[in-house]
């Protein structure tokens, strides 16, 4: 197993390199000149030149790629520029950056200036919009996202598995077909509609839950702000999960070993709950494994509607503001996380599927 | 069927037996749910063809009614907004929308307000009620929903078609060739799948939106491109697996034995045997992409504000609901839900009809 | 004799997709005496498995309709009207079943020990500990070496033969009165088949149970059955004592089944087929005259293979690669107009030899001399003109024809690729003529493969090869998937074509009787190595190698074997 894990980690290197390349190509070439994006409405040529220098985009592509690789390697906690810079950073750069984005809060300005004036060393990559350190942004936003998404994932999986066994048991009956039809219809209504309507009725009109908001207390968040978004996410996620898991159960039911189990004289319940269940759990766990990385992105729609300061909302804000450093960092972080989760799921397989061999 | 006389003459008797496609069609014909879904989908396709050619919903952008004109069936309801129209912006009445910093529409409000004001002057005669109500500018909601359907369905169809083509070609090459080429494509695939899907879409959206080079393609072509470039991976994986399976089948080996070239084996022999998988995937992705387009447009990352899609309608409807104007929400939600339900059920029926296992 | 099970008027219909009804079993009646083995014999679609599954009520409830007139009485109780809960008490305890595919019939995620002890806990009221201990004894009894360790093994860690032994252990665990064995040896190699048959026969005696043995192969039946029931198209054609069935069969179908299958003892010029028994004319002299076979000194050698080897590379551990030799230095000669038989068990490398010498796999070493030219050294382009001269017919008739092509397209394609025939018209004519030659009506030209039976598809596959007039035809288990009666027809066709076109065959099969019948020379392979090559009669009468003797000893000999014993 050790050898397997090591080889899999080895295989991640080219994939990660590819992700970096994709991100670099997207943001540094397809997206146009990053300096112009950052400059926004500034048209002063000199200033733009300055920004270009600041960002390092005056360099040839391979050098820029090198800068980016360095940032990735340090987890965006250190830019190549700050790493190599002389103790005193040129002040004009700071100004240019601060001015660069018109959307920057006035409050952020002095802060940024103050930070710039600090003695140099390693400096984290900063948001173009708020000048906050990107690793800090992502670290502070992950909490609210997980507060919503972990309960969603756990409850939804349990509910979907239980219901799926039920409908698989009733396969072919009218009840089964009705439930499947309801699922199809439920899946056809946009998530947006569910959120808009639920927020209007449960929050605005009937006042059962706060319309939106978030606090600093985890308990308060979980008990007052989170329930409505959590229930919405489960409600919307249940139909597709139920359909999928039902198909996993049905795939298993047609296997020869089920016939053997019946030939042994086992009751239908035992056949389903022991023999079929154990086999169907394999694709179900795969599926949960696939869904896991997107938990960390959270449901950006829910976070947006309910003003939850989570990762999804942050990324969406960054997209709307063309705040490239945040998007780039989030993408790289989550790609690494996805790869690690995939590896963990594959290792977990061994525990549930004895046929799996680490090759 | 008429009897076919055996003959030694070379004149081909074009009395071919039904092929697998014909048989699948016969099975589909017997599937009542499938046929009803097909009729509904066909109706929508005709409708959008009509709206595309200007036969229906030509005047969707004409402001024919008063602001928030009541639906005809509730003509008596009070319409405060119509009375106040022009005198005051309704925007301030939206109590909870704290989206100011991220609301993609924010910069547009001013422009709309101006436009509303201009129109006020040139306005001649406006209807008090419209069949299913009017929007803020007094546009007919039914016509808007039809035009919105055109945009959303077009985006879904074209993007799904492109994604299927990309996924099929890459999957075919990777699955059939294997070896170095296969490894390279697997690497490429791994890059795309190690980034959570939502994040991938947002990253592409961020870059495409800000790219000056792509500025002229903003709107529908850009949404199509974003969805197609990020959505091919699932199809790739399936097609690749099918190609691996078929490449080792005896009929392909037999083709190799008689000297058929690689391209002949790939496209003449295997492709028709895999095409049903592609068709079902195409159909599934249309549904998926229509839903994605609605969300993207809602967030302001999709079609531009001056055109209409179900997504932009929902975006407007969110604030309308609070002031009790529910018709735009209902029109967009219902029309979308009907189409998507029908399309999903058609997909299921299609899969059943095409899947040789069901025989 | 005391009857354990009485089946009377069993009638089973299946609801098919699209509303049609298929009569699977048409009102059959038969008995199973206590402490005896009854064999239910029939070809595919005869309804034999459906009948057996009706006894334990394991037919898919949504599709199967059992007529209310049917009755299955077991020890005096009617199984068909028994409540589900009572039926479950009988299943696995009084009546147990073993199936054809041991690999898929065992649950892959539970250990063998779990699966055997489960049934003991269920029916014998044992504690987990007792059940485990008893399961271990059972593993020992069915001949699994090192049972203590094997209890912890998962099914995929065992060979097919051992998996079937686990199934048997599970089936006999509760001392059933009736064991239903549904083609239990069909998926196994011939030497393993022999062992499993012996085991079932032994257990039948020692556990005093009755066995209902379902098979398509009469030869297997002779040695283990007391009574035989022959089924065709859902009806019983004949039933009786095993001696009577083999020595004095009454029904033409039974006679045909006995005569269609080639046996090691005789080699008629032509194999009789069912029609010969059904028709007025009866058997002709050619069905009795013997054919002489064997290489002779003055044979013209068309293909010579020297030291052919094939390595497969497997990934193993970190960056390591392991090489597995599928074929290790095989050498043989093929004479014009003669047949070389290639026999061996699964994994012996016999199929790889065939695929490698025609370059469907790349060889790892050796020479393939065809008319003096080494095919392995040719470029892809130079190989083109040799491709049409060596052709292959595969095993699975359902997979070897492209389902999206009409038979016409299938036949025209090779001619187009190799520019055979002046124009389309001539090619169509040639294809039509070939269809006729392989015994297919010309209308087939316009049909799709799914409209044909397995035997017909195999004829089409043969016609496809014939379009190129090959010198060498490789038959890779080409008749193995066919019912015996159809198998005889295809073997006759192959023989006729060889006589007519003087083609050389490489006939690959695991079935030693068929190979003996069709081959001039036989090559025995095991684990990638050639064990023995000799003329067919010599190898069967006078095997030189231990492995060959073991293989030959495992051939089911039907009634002759039973008589000898």
Image (cartoon, grey):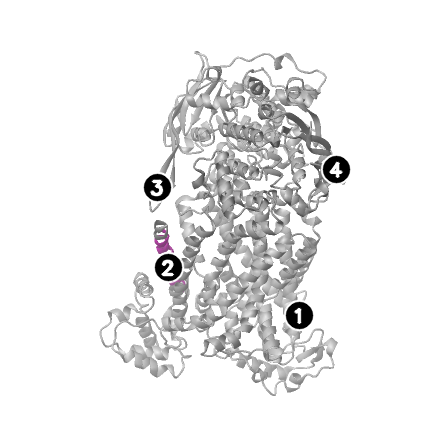
Q: Are marks 4 and 1 in contact (CB under 8 Å)?
A: no
Residue A52 vs residue A84: left or right? right
User: On residue C321, which mark appears?
Assistant: 3
Front tag of 4 and 1: 4
Residue at the location (65% across, 25% down)?
Answer: C227
Q: Is residue A44 above or below residue C532?
A: below
Cα distance between the residues tagged 3 and 2: 31 Å
User: On residue C70, which mark appears?
Assistant: 4
SS at mark 1 in the image: helix
User: Callout 4: 10 Å neighbours few (<14), some, many (20+)?
Assistant: some
Q: Are marks 1 and 2 on the same chain?
A: no
Provide the residue designation for mark 1.
B143
Provide the residue designation for mark 2.
A21
Q: Are marks 3 and 1 on the same chain?
A: no
- Foreground residue among C291 and C563: C563
Q: Are marks 3 and 1 in contact (CB under 8 Å)?
A: no
Q: Which range is magenta? A: A7-26
SS at mark 3 in the image: strand
Residue at the location (61% across, 41% down)?
Answer: C93
SS at mark 4 in the image: loop
């Amino acid at each position: 197993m050790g050898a397997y894990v090591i080889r899999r980690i080895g295989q991640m290197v080219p994939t990660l390199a590819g992700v970096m390349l994709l991100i670099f190509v997207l943001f540094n070439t397809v997206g146009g000149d990053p300096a112009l994006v950052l400059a926004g409405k500034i048209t002063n040529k000199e200033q733009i030149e300055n920004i270009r220098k600041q960002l390092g985009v005056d360099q040839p592509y391979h050098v820029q790629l090198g800068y980016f690789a360095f940032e990735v390697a340090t987890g965006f906690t250190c830019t190549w520029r700050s790493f190599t810079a002389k103790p005193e950073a040129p002040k004009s750069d700071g100004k240019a950056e601060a001015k660069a984005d018109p959307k920057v809060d006035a409050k952020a300005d002095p802060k940024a200036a103050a930070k710039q004036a600090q003695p140099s060393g390693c400096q984290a990559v900063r948001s173009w919009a708020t000048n906050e350190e990107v690793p800090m942004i992502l670290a502070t936003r992950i909490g609210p996202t997980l507060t919503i998404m972990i309960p969603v994932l756990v409850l939804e999986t349990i509910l979907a598995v239980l219901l799926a066994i039920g409908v698989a048991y009733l396969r072919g009956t009218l009840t089964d077909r009705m439930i499947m039809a309801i699922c199809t219809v439920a899946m056809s209504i946009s998530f947006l509609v569910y959120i808009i309507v639920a927020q209007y009725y449960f929050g605005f009109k009937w006042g059962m839950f706060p319309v939106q908001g978030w606090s600093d207390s985890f308990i308060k968040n979980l008990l007052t702000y989170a329930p409505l978004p959590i229930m919405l996410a489960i409600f919307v996620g249940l139909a597709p999960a139920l359909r999928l898991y039902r198909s996993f159960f049905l795939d298993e039911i047609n296997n020869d070993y089920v016939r053997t189990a019946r030939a042994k004289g086992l009751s239908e319940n035992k056949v389903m709950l022991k023999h079929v269940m154990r086999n169907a759990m394999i694709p179900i766990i795969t599926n949960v494994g696939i869904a896991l990385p997107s938990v960390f992105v959270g449901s950006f729609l829910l976070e947006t509607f309910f003003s939850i300061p989570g990762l999804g909302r942050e990324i969406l804000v960054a997209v709307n503001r063309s705040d490239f450093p945040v998007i780039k960092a989030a993408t790289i972080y989550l790609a690494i996380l996805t790869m690690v989760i995939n590896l963990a799921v594959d290792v977990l397989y061994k525990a549930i599927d004895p046929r799996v061999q680490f090759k | 069927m008429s009897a076919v006389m055996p003959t030694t003459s070379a004149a081909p008797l074009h009395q071919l037996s039904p092929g697998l496609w014909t048989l699948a069609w016969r099975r589909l014909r017997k599937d009542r749910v499938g046929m009803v879904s097909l009729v509904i989908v066909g109706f929508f396709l005709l409708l959008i063809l009509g709206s595309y050619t200007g036969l229906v919903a030509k005047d969707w952008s004409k402001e024919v009614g008063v602001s928030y004109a009541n639906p005809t069936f509730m003509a008596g309801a009070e319409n405060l907004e119509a009375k106040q129209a022009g005198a005051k912006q309704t925007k301030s009445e939206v109590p909870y929308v704290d989206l100011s910093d991220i609301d993609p529409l924010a910069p547009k409000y001013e422009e709309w307000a101006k436009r509303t004001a201009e129109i006020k002057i040139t306005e001649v005669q406006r209807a008090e009620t419209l069949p299913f109500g009017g929007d803020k500018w007094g546009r007919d909601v039914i016509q808007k929903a039809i035009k919105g359907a055109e945009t959303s369905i077009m985006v879904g169809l074209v993007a799904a078609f492109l994604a299927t083509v990309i996924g099929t070609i890459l999957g075919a090459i990777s699955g059939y060739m294997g070896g170095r080429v296969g490894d390279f494509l697997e690497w490429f695939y791994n890059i795309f799948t190690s980034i959570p899907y939502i994040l991938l879409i947002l990253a592409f959206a961020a870059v495409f939106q800000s790219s000056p080079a792509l500025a002229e393609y903003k709107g529908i072509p850009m949404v199509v491109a974003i969805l197609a470039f990020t959505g091919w991976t699932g199809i790739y994986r399936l097609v690749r697996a099918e190609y691996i399976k078929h490449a080792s089948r005896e009929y392909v080996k037999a083709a190799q034995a008689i000297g058929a070239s690689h391209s002949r084996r790939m496209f003449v022999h295997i492709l028709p045997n895999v095409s049903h998988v592609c068709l079902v995937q195409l159909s599934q992705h249309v549904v998926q992409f229509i839903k994605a387009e609605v969300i993207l447009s809602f967030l302001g990352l999709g079609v531009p504000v001056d055109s209409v899609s179900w997504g932009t309608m929902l975006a407007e409807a969110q604030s309308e609901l609070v002031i009790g104007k529910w018709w735009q929400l209902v029109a967009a939600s219902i029309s979308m839900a009907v189409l998507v339900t029908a399309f999903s059920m058609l997909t299921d029926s299609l899969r059943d009809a095409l899947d040789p296992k069901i025989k | 004799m005391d009857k354990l099970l009485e089946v009377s008027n069993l009638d089973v219909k299946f609801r098919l997709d699209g509303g049609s009804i298929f009569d699977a079993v048409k009102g059959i009646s038969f008995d199973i005496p206590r402490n005896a083995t009854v064999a239910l014999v029939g070809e595919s679609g005869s309804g034999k498995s459906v009948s057996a599954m009706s006894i334990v009520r394991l037919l898919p409830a949504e599709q199967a309709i059992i007529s209310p007139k049917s009755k299955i009485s077991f020890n005096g109780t009617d199984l068909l009207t028994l409540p589900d809960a009572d039926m479950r008490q009988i299943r696995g305890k009084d009546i147990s079943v073993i199936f054809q595919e041991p690999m898929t019939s065992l649950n892959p995620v539970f250990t063998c020990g779990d699966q055997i002890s489960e049934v003991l806990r269920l029916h014998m009221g044992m504690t987990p500990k007792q059940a485990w201990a008893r399961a271990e004894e059972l593993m020992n009894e069915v001949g699994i070496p090192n049972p203590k360790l094997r209890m912890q093994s998962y099914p995929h860690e065992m060979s097919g033969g051992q998996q079937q032994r686990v199934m048997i252990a599970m089936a006999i665990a509760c001392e059933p009165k009736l064991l239903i064995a549904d083609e239990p040896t069909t998926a196994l190699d011939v030497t393993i088949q022999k062992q499993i048959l012996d085991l079932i026969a032994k257990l039948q005696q020692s556990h005093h149970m009755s066995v209902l043995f379902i098979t398509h192969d009469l030869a297997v039946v002779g040695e283990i059955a007391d009574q035989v029931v022959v089924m065709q198209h859902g009806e019983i054609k004949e039933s009786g004592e095993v001696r009577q069935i083999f020595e004095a069969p009454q029904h033409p179908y039974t006679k045909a089944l006995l005569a269609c299958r080639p046996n090691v003892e005789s080699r008629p010029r032509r194999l009789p087929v069912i029609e010969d028994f059904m028709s007025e004319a009866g058997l002709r002299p050619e069905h009795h005259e013997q054919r002489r076979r064997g290489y002779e000194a003055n044979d013209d050698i068309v293909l010579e293979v020297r030291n052919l080897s094939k390595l497969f590379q497997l990934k193993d551990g970190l960056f390591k690669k392991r090489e597995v030799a599928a074929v290790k230095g095989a050498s043989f000669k093929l004479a014009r107009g003669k047949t070389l038989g290639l026999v061996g068990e699964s994994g012996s490398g016999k199929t790889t030899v065939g695929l490698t010498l025609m370059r469907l796999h790349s060889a790892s070493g050796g020479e393939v001399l065809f008319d003096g030219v080494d095919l392995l050294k040719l470029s892809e382009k130079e190989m083109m003109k040799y491709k049409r001269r060596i052709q292959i017919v595969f095993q699975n008739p359902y997979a070897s024809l492209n389902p999206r092509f009409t038979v016409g397209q299938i036949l025209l394609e090779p001619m187009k690729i190799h520019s055979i025939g002046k124009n389309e018209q001539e090619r169509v004519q040639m294809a039509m003529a070939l269809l006729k030659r392989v015994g297919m009506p010309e209308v087939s030209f316009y049909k799709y493969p799914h409209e044909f039976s397995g035997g017909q598809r195999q004829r089409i596959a043969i016609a496809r090869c014939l379009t190129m007039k090959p010198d060498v035809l490789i038959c890779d288990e080409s008749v193995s998937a066919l019912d015996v009666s159809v198998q005889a027809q295809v073997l006759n066709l192959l023989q006729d074509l060889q006589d007519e076109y003087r083609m050389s065959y490489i006939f690959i099969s695991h079935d030693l009787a068929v190979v003996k019948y069709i081959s001039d020379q036989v090559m025995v392979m095991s684990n990638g190595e050639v064990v023995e090559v000799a003329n067919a009669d010599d190898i069967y009468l006078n095997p030189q190698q231990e492995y060959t003797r073991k293989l030959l000893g495992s051939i089911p000999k039907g009634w002759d074997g039973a008589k000898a014993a």
